[in-house]
Amino acid sequence: MSVRILVVDDEDILIRCYRRILENSGYQVDYVNSGLDALKRIEASRFDLIILDYLMPEMNGMEVLRRITELQTDTKVIMVTGLDKIETQSRAKELGVFDYLPKPFDPDDLKRAVERALAN
């Protein structure tokens, strides 16, 4: 069974970046552009890992994270954000985020975070 990853980000250029990094690493990856679409996809399917942008229109990543923990309690989440604030990191950790990557991130940092999350 292959690993399923859901990427949630509203920036198309980052979706292309994730696609290149993750699919070239052999992962099965689904992509959505909003928190609401992410929740619909999570309700319909099971994912091993979710990579979640913090700052998105309509519903921010923190709200999506809170809802994810209600829907799939054992799914690991990596939050990615350009807002590298201690308060945001602390709140995300309280809600159960596995890892937190600041933007811009190095592709190798993303790969390592994904590997750690899936191994844990």
Image: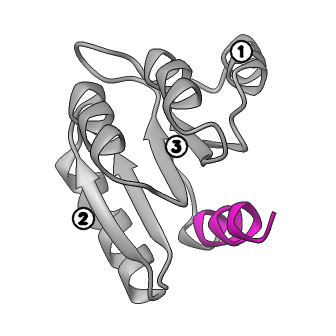
Residue 108 versus residue 52 in the image, above or below: below
- Crowd tier of the residue under label 3, counting other residues whose Cα lies within 10 Å: few below 14, some 14–19, many 20 or above: few
* Secondary structure of the residue carrying numbered label 2: helix
Determine the image quadrant of residue 107: bottom right
| Mark nearer the viewer, 1 or 2 | 1
Please report whichever mark, 2 or 3, sits nearer to the chain's N-terminal start: 2
Q: Using residue 10 as the reference point, say whether residue 80 is left or right of it.
A: right
Pick whichever, 15 or 4, lies toward us.
4
Q: Residue at x 61, y 72 (%)?
A: 111
* Secondary structure of the residue carrying numbered label 1: helix
Please report whichever mark, 1 or 2, sits nearer to the chain's N-terminal start: 2
Marks 1 and 2, how far apart at CA: 28 Å
Is residue 25 on the magenta stretch?
Answer: no
For label 2, the residue is 16
Specify the amino acid type for callout 3: Lys
Q: Where is residue 55 in the image (x, y as percent from the top left)?
A: 39, 23
State which quarter of the image contains the C terminus: bottom right
Q: Where is residue 14 in the image (x, y as percent from the top left)?
A: 31, 53
Is residue 112 on the magenta stretch?
Answer: yes
**Region of the chain picked out in magenta, as a range:** 109-120
Residue 82 versus residue 27 in the image, above or below: above
For label 1, the residue is 91
* Secondary structure of the residue carrying numbered label 3: loop
Q: Where is residue 73 in the image (x, y as percent from the top left)?
A: 63, 37
| Mark nearer the viewer, 1 or 3 | 1
- Crowd tier of the residue under label 1, counting other residues whose Cα lies within 10 Å: few below 14, some 14–19, many 20 or above: few
For label 3, the residue is 103
Marks 2 and 3, how far apart at CA: 15 Å
Residue 9 versus residue 30 in the image, above or below: above
Pick whichever, 42 or 65, lies toward us.
42
Residue 75, numbered circle: none
